[in-house]
Amino acid sequence: MKLSTTIRYGTRLMLDMAEHNETGPIRIKTIAQRQGISEKYLEKIVRLLRKAGLVDGLRGPGGGYVLAVPPEKITMGAILEAVQGRIELCPCLGEPEHCEKHMYCKTRMVWNDINAAVSSRLHSITLADLRDSTCPVDTKEVH
């Protein structure tokens, strides 16, 4: 399983907003510079996040984007679903008719269990958890 660039960038955008939430509205240009991500790409992602109700936009001088929901209530799962849609490891989990064998497929049960575990974990990690975590850095020298 590989996460899309949109998911990774969407998470970085939301985390940046959570880290700077107290300063008021943030311009996409500012986030793009801090994160090293194209403004155009972030604008596309922020539209999806607005549609999902996770981000609000404010116009005018001093405008920009703010979190529409406190970071403690925004989960990684909500971000992923806002930018990509439902969490599904394979198409037959969301739309069984994609596979003619879905009625008797023994592996579908395994994919469903794994999918449920991944979804549960993603919905248990909040933006506040990420914001408040410390990123361990290995300071050992490489020989």
Image (cartoon, grey):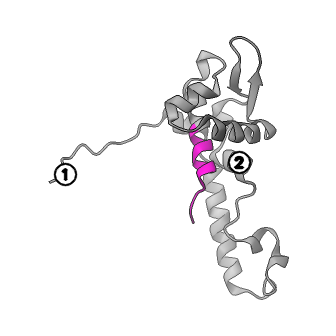
Q: Earlier in the sequence, mark 2 or mark 1?
A: 2
Q: Nearer the viewer, residue 1 or 111?
A: 1
Q: Is residue 26 above or below residue 79?
A: above
Answer yes or no: is residue 92 visible.
yes
Residue 73 at what x, y percent from top left? 68, 36
Q: Is residue 107 above or below residue 50?
A: below
Q: Label 1's element?
A: loop
Assign the N terminus to one quadrant of the image. bottom right
Locate residue 26: give its quadrant: top right
Q: Does the magenta run of residues contain 7?
A: yes
Packing grade of label 2 (10 A; few <14, some 14-19, many >=20) is many
Q: Are marks 2 and 1 in contact (CB under 8 Å)?
A: no
Q: Nearer the viewer, residue 85 or 128?
A: 85
Residue that label 1 marks: 142
Assign the C terminus to one quadrant of the image. bottom left
Residue 105 at what x, y percent from top left? 73, 86
Dominant SS of magenta comes to helix
Residue 40 at what x, y percent from top left? 66, 37
Q: Residue at x 53, y 39 (%)?
A: 130
Q: Amino acid at mark 1?
A: Val
Residue that label 2 marks: 83
Q: Residue at x 69, y 36 (%)?
A: 43
Q: Does the magenta run of residues contain 106?
A: no
Q: Nearer the viewer, residue 140 or 124?
A: 140
Taking the view exactly as shown, the residue that stands out farthest to the left is: 143
Write down the region rendered in magenta: 1-12
